[in-house]
Every structure is written in C-alpha cells, then in structure tokens.
Image (tube, rainbow, N blue to C red):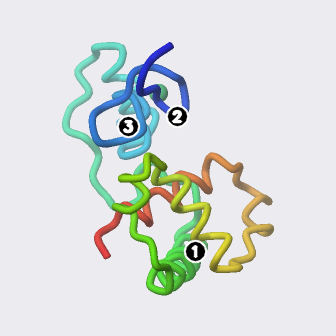
Amino acid sequence: MTKNPCTICGEPRLVGVELCMYHWNEWNWGKDWADKVRAGEPAGPAPTGPRYGMKMQAGDFENLRAAINAARSASEYSLDDYTVAGLSEARYGWDLLWASKFDIRPLYNYLSDRHIETALRRIVMEPV
Ligand SMILES: [Zn+2]
C-alpha cells in the first residue's frame, strides 16, 4: 500500500498535493496535455488559462466560489488547520459546501462528484 496515494488512482502523489503527477497535470491543464506528458511525447508548453481541466461551467463556478468563500470566512477553521489535522483539502471543501447550504443538485445534471470536488479543491486552494 502506498503511503500517500493519489486520491484518484492510488499512485504515489506529489509532495504538497493530493494527486500523482498525471492527475495533477490533468487537473491543471487538461487530459490531452497530461496524456502527452505521460506518454513521453513532446507536449509543448502547458496550456494557459484559469479554467484548464475544469468541467464546471464558469457561471456555476463563480456561484459556488462565492458560497464557499462566504462559508470559509465564517468558519473557525482554515485549510492549514485541516492540513495539520491530517485532513485533505477535498474534505475542507466538502465541509464548507455543507456549511454554505449551497444547492448543488442542479450541478449533477452535467457533473459528477469528482468534477464538483475538483472545483471545491480549486476554490479552497486559492489564496484567501
Ligand atoms: Zn493519480
């Protein structure tokens, strides 16, 4: 058993994040680019743009971010507190989502838990 597995695939993860190299690349820059890097193909410079790898639509993301950041401001816990306690940024995101009472049911029309978790992580990892 890997000591610090990637939360998606179980491969060893990078220091400081919950993902392996492949899933970190996919999360940040999209599957096409991550696949090229994994295959050892010349991938060129990483794509740029704030939403690479995000499947959530921009309007939904902005609404979610506003709700999460409001819950975060009201929370007595920071992401650092969670990290010190051995809890993940994903857990912090889901806990803030619950506290926010944000209605995510419409998001499931086109997203899975994994997509929502990706957005949550991205939000809580942004500097406050
Ligand atoms: Zn992985």
- Mark 2, Cα crowd under 10 Å, few <14 / some 14-19 / many 20+, is some
Residue at 62% in and 56% down = 116
Which residue is tagged 3? 24
- For this rendering, which residue is in front, 44 or 58? 58
Which residue is tagged 1? 64
Q: Distance between the residues labelled 1 and 2?
A: 22 Å
Label 3 within 8 A of ligand 1 by Cβ:
yes
In the picture, measured across the screen, residue 110 lies left or right of residue 12, that is right
Q: Quadrant of residue 128?
A: bottom left
Which residue is tagged 2? 7
Q: Residue 51 carries which label?
A: none
Label 2 within 8 A of ligand 1 by Cβ:
yes
- Mark 1, Cα crowd under 10 Å, few <14 / some 14-19 / many 20+, is many
Labels 1 & 2 near each other (Cβ < 8 A): no
Q: Which secondary structure lies at badge 2?
A: loop
- Does 117 appear above or below 95? above
Labels 2 & 3 near each other (Cβ < 8 A): no
